[in-house]
Image: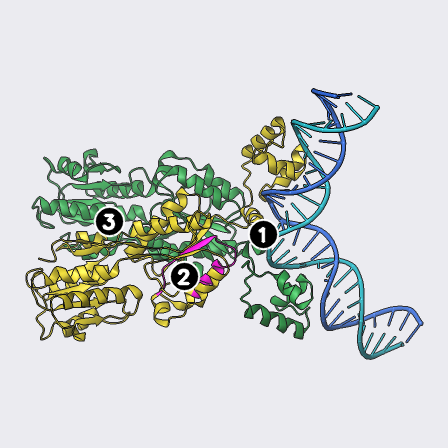
Chain colours: A yellow, B green, C cyan, D blue
Amino acid sequence: MPKMTQKDIAAHFGVSVSTVSKALKDSYEIGAEMRHAIQAYAREHHYQPNILAKNLRNKQTGTIGVVVPNILNYFFTQVFAGIEKVADARGFSIVSCISDESYDKEVKTMGVLNSGMVDGVIISLAKETQQKGAFTHIQEVLEGGTPLTMIDRVENSIVCDKVIVDDFRAGYTATKHFLDKAKKPVALVSTIQGSSVGNLRLQGYKRALKEVGMPFEAKWVVPVGKDDDLEILLNLLLANQDLQGIICLDEISAIETLHILKRKKRNIPEEIGVIGFTDGRLSKYVSPALTTVSQHGKYIGETAAHMLIDRIQGKARETYETRMVETHLVVRESTL
Amino acid sequence: MPKMTQKDIAAHFGVSVSTVSKALKDSYEIGAEMRHAIQAYAREHHYQPNILAKNLRNKQTGTIGVVVPNILNYFFTQVFAGIEKVADARGFSIVSCISDESYDKEVKTMGVLNSGMVDGVIISLAKETQQKGAFTHIQEVLEGGTPLTMIDRVENSIVCDKVIVDDFRAGYTATKHFLDKAKKPVALVSTIQGSSVGNLRLQGYKRALKEVGMPFEAKWVVPVGKDDDLEILLNLLLANQDLQGIICLDEISAIETLHILKRKKRNIPEEIGVIGFTDGRLSKYVSPALTTVSQHGKYIGETAAHMLIDRIQGKARETYETRMVETHLVVRESTL
DNA sequence: TACTATCCCGAAAACGTTTGAATACTCAAC
DNA sequence: GTTGAGTATTCAAACGTTTTCGGGATAGTA
């Protein structure tokens, strides 16, 4: 059974479709009797306006596109949950895309979003995109007049609303947490080498070193790629070095180094400490519980959604804004 | 700058829009010269066809709706990832909705989906919906001619494609795992009391008891609601009972009982064992590592997406199908 | 009677695309 | 010089809404 349209209703009452359309939105132009009859009939028969036709006519869709690099990463699922919450509250639907850290998939995705399907998009760039430095697919959306707000993994050269976490400070604080205890080397293992947030955290790390007068040494930072074996890299790292701690730039690798260290019978935190990023349930429940920097993912999502929808609805100020949300070091058992 | 349309291209070449439309899809009707000129021009200027207009005309949207109760639950994010993967591979976009376990939000959601926006929907019912037993919002979608496949939390009275996990067997196997070691009571803590999967697991549990000749006792099953304090309930449970183990029907509560037991200095697994559901990273990394029943969430998502898209594309057989995916008990340190 | 005001409603265009049918033109064959 | 067959392009309707404009009817006023 094909869905009922206004035409069907019009036929049933022997009136025109414009009458039906107006009646359904309770227009004063239609007499009360007819109006209520039509409304009742529509309700009765579960009439649903065709949203495509409506959107085509109105040139706005009430949906926003969200593209994140990886939903399995708890930080992003928190962000997503935040976005969904305020989108729903403000009457928007979400079409969601996972770029899977792939540049190609990201441009493909932006293509489908940039075709009238959404009123705005929220995006966190794929790692590959950031390394490549190619952003025309993003620019095109903006130039098409579709508002876009970038979150977390942003690109400064693009002018748009942004919400980022204070990654410099996060890197700094984590490093300082170690350095305040002892002036001994701290390592940095990074699965996001080359991304904007990875760089900022690295700089924060360097700044902390500098402040206590320790020279930065390249051997302390361990970039880990998709196919690298973390254990091998850690072995290299631990050989002949008197580390007091390791900072891992994402939750999973933090948990894994924790486990590797435990397997090696290293004493945590006395002998060596570990700090992770993203305050997920993993960090809380692992043993020893992980000291971690919390990024407030849900709040980031909420903020981004509000900014975007404000702009869509013309409630934003003219100039673009970049909001920085502070991180927060949650000290637990994996550090002194 | 408003987006470029076929009309603009037509004006530029001094031809009609139908010529442009046909040229863009490489129709033999249009002369080679004109055809290529138009295509080049369109590429050049980043022409993107308005997808709403296209969909309105073609009566199909190339998108599917996904509604899950809770994205923060790792099982569902796995399912989601699976759906996204095959949807993308088969050229579909997905609009995602989170029902948040709320009946009202679910019906609202189905309303917007059931308005021509999607070609099909994949849904896992909210807990509240299952308890209420009200499914007209689902039926309406089906009656509107939109294919729908249910996953995990399904309703038998609705005829449609389904993919479920063998929850009866899962409950049975988990229970049996304990009972094979000793004929001592096993408790069941359930955060999903009243849901279809909760009931099935409970029945599996009962069956296992029966097989070894132990009578079922209601006090062994602990329903835990949203606002309940798990620790209090566990205290009640542990008082005056000689349990050999606890089965928790979701990952989070399993981890939490693990922690509560550790706080109480109970020896795990010697004194008391714990089995959880959903094989997430939490279960693997917690200490002691959790014995858990793995539900293969990603595979479920992939299967559901394939079934749905097959049906959308008319590749499915006439009769509806319900696919059952087996679970798998991953034995780790939290049980003997 | 004529003029205006009010109330209900319909006609039609518009959103951007697709597509079957129709037209125009060219060239060849009878 | 009529017919026929291609080829290249245009026309027009359609998808389901929304909205502007205008018109007919009735009632009220002068």
Q: Are marks 3 and 2 on the same chain?
A: no
- Horizontal side of A60 relative to B176 (left or right) equals right
Residue type, label 2:
Val
Query: Which element type, helix, strand or loop, lies under badge 2?
Result: loop
State how far apart marks 2 and 1 are (Cα). 34 Å
B145 magenta-colored: no
Q: Is residue B52 visible?
A: yes
Q: Is residue B164 above or below residue A275?
A: above
Q: Earlier in the sequence, mark 1 or mark 3?
A: 1
Chain letter belonging to callout 1? B
- Mark 2: few/some/many CA within 10 Å (<14, 14-19, 20+): some
Query: Which element type, helix, strand or loop, lies under badge 3?
Result: helix
Q: Are marks 1 and 3 on the same chain?
A: yes
Residue B328 figure quarter: bottom left
Residue tagged by mark 1? B56
Magenta region: A107-126
Residue drawn at the location 46% of the way across and 43% of the way down: B110
Residue drawn at the location 45% of the way across and 62% of the way down: A110
- Horizontal side of A59 relative to B284 (left or right) equals right
Residue type, label 1:
Leu
Q: Is residue B302 visible?
A: no
Q: Point out residue A135 in the picture as x, y percentages from the top left corner.
A: 42, 67
Residue tagged by mark 2? A159
Q: Nearer the viewer, mark 2 or mark 1?
A: 2
State how far apart marks 3 and 2 are (Cα). 42 Å
Q: Is residue B28 above or below residue C15?
A: below
